Image: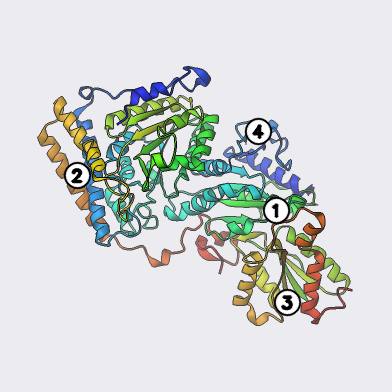
Amino acid sequence: MELTYREAVRRALMEEMERDERVFIMGEDVGAYGGSYAVTKGLLARFGPERVRDTPISEAAIAGAGIGAALGGLRPVVEIMSINFILPAADQLINGAAKIHYMFNGQFHVPLVVRTVNGGRRLAATHSQNLEVLFAFIPGLKVVTPASPADAYGLLKAAIRDPDPVLFVESALLYSMKGPVPDDPDFLVPLGQSLVRREGRDLTLVAHSRGVVVALEAAERLAAQGVEAEVVDLRTLRPLDMGPVLASVRKTGRVVIVGDDWQSYGVGAEIAARLAEEAFEALRGPVLRVGGAEVPMPYAANLERLALPQVDGVIRRAARLLEGDGAWLVR
Amino acid sequence: MGGGEGMAQANNPEPGRDGWTGWTPDPPPDLRDEPPERLLEYYRQMQVIRHFEERAAQAYTQGRIGGFLHLANGEEALAVGGLAALEPEDDLITHYRDHGVALARGSDPGRVMAELFGRADGVSGGRGGSMHLADAGRRFWGGHAIVGIHLPIAAGLALAHQYRKEPRVVLCIFGDGATNTGAFHEALNLAATWELPVIFLCQNNLYGMGTAIERAMRVTELHRRGAAYGIPSARINGMRLLEVRAAVASAARWAREGKGPVFLEALTYRYRGHSMADPELYRTKEELKAWRAWDPIQLFAQELLEAGVVTPEALRRADQEAEQVVEAAIAFAEQSPEPDPATLHHGVYRAPLAAALPAGGGNGVGAHLP
């Protein structure tokens, strides 16, 4: 069936709530309001206020209550309205959820899903961030960043059934994207598996979240000029599955990493380091990155556009790898 | 010392309003109405905790315990009295000053000591240390060492009970310092709004590390903070075991009946520093001496003797038993092996990662896949 990314998330939530009575939702305005991005619209009417719980604006309490409810045997799906608002909950997730299983020697575990959203447009510095990498740094957390309706559906179901704390980062800019989704309530996309989204022999584009869409568009444009780019969607940032990335780079020898996050210490930095460690001999040029400008996001439309990774930026770097100056590609 | 009753009244300006003011703590029972064996057992448990911590302090100075060691000498009545009010199926969660609480909940003293020693047989396998004790079988959810972090978690444990309509409660213990963290305020507000069955038991020992409460907040009668969230609250004497037990039991009854959380402030004092590393420059010897006169164990013993419910001989026997228990715990910890080095990466996750990845990878243990 064909669903939007938003519908895919909603469908996964509904089906998992129907499958398992322990699954419930809580967050700011997830009930009566229907969710800030309308993802949970209709769920209150369907499941009632015990299972679709509006909370105060209180991120530490929401995340902490999620941890406690998970310890107590439930399967909470907590919504943090935007990843920009997650920092008050970071203590709960980093010092709490991530540590509990290991530190207490596996005596108990935290089957918690925290759904949140990155990206945003014309919202300026405090509302436009891609902070998932902060959490991908933390052993004990799992961080998932779906970039298609099918992955949003299958990864969320897998996250809800997973026994560990999962940060599930949706992309505000992908909610209206349509795509095929298997009509199967047990369709799961395992956490920790990267995926080749497009095959190609000349060049590898590695991306996550909205970066995948940028990479796919760049691949289209490159194909029109006879360059076959392979696009690898990381899908899960931790645990990170480098297998398809390494296989692709060993084939193409060229790689550009695409993401909306800042480059310094970002996802691309980790991928580049892993390539240097594990596939150095396969590289035919430098590992290049396309990321956000290292500024707090400006509001003005022209400045914002400059601060975000664009398809042209990917093409320029591809050209540099393929042709030295690559002038023929960017004309 | 502040008394309990007067404060509870002062905190009750509009009886009946919003349903939150109907609660006051039960007074302590008459000693003669209690089975003597039970009273003697409370005494014995307090002595076990006292000896345990004294021996731990010794082991720490000998370098056999590492890191931080936060002792609770002087606060034993709070642990034993508070835990005596819980049912086995109730939940317990606490902060890093957790040895006494673990022992009062029934965790094996040898395994607790082994945890302090960083050994494989420790309650947390040697991975948690003094600050991170836990005992899943006793519904003891830790030992949390970031101040205030466990209060929202307590609310969530209570939510699980409410969700399943089980008459269980959560006892959440924290210090006076935690009441200035955002997590405290968020947790109390959520618990009150959703009427969650949590007893927030504040162990007010008058200092957040070395900062006296009057230097950290204007409202030093901490129980008054409960009113801001519509939570019935009271101040109790944390040095008197039966007063603590009665207050926690009546709070648990209230919460179990679905009436929501209760906030208890138990006044107490720690004779030792914040941790073993504390030079104690912030308080006087006179203050310490004054509080030692309220020693919860001596106080309790004196009351038992005066009421004629136990003999001096029985107390002496309990003292000896307590010492034996602690010596056995030390011996157990000493003979316990260090954790197997091969387990370093084990259990970062619960799920076996290998199952997710056909190519294998980590056997469910590592952060990254090979």
In this rendering, the answer to whether B224 lies above or below B179 is above
User: Where residue B129 is drawn, which disc sits there?
Assistant: none
Q: Position of residue B332 (x, y in %)?
A: 25, 56
> Badge 3, how many Cα within 10 Å: few under 14, some, many 20+?
many
Mark found first going from the N terminus, 1 or 3: 1
Q: Position of residue B49 (x, y in %)?
A: 25, 44
Which chain's residue wears label 3? Answer: A
Residue carrying label 3: A254
Q: Position of residue B340 (x, y in %)?
A: 37, 65
Q: Are marks 4 and 1 on the same chain?
A: yes
The one of A326 and A145 positioned closer to us in this rendering: A326
Residue carrying label 4: A47
Residue carrying label 2: B322
Query: Residue A263 lies in what quarter of the image?
Result: bottom right
Q: Amino acid at mark 4?
A: Phe
User: Where residue A125 is drawn, which disc sits there?
Assistant: 1
C-alpha span from label 4 to label 1: 36 Å
Q: Is residue B293 left or right of residue B92?
A: left
The one of B199 and A204 positioned closer to us in this rendering: B199
Which secondary structure, mark 4? helix
At 37% from the left edge and 56% from the top edge, which residue is drawn? B125
Residue B93 visible in the picture: no
C-alpha span from label 2 to label 4: 54 Å
Q: Position of residue A99 (x, y in %)?
A: 48, 54
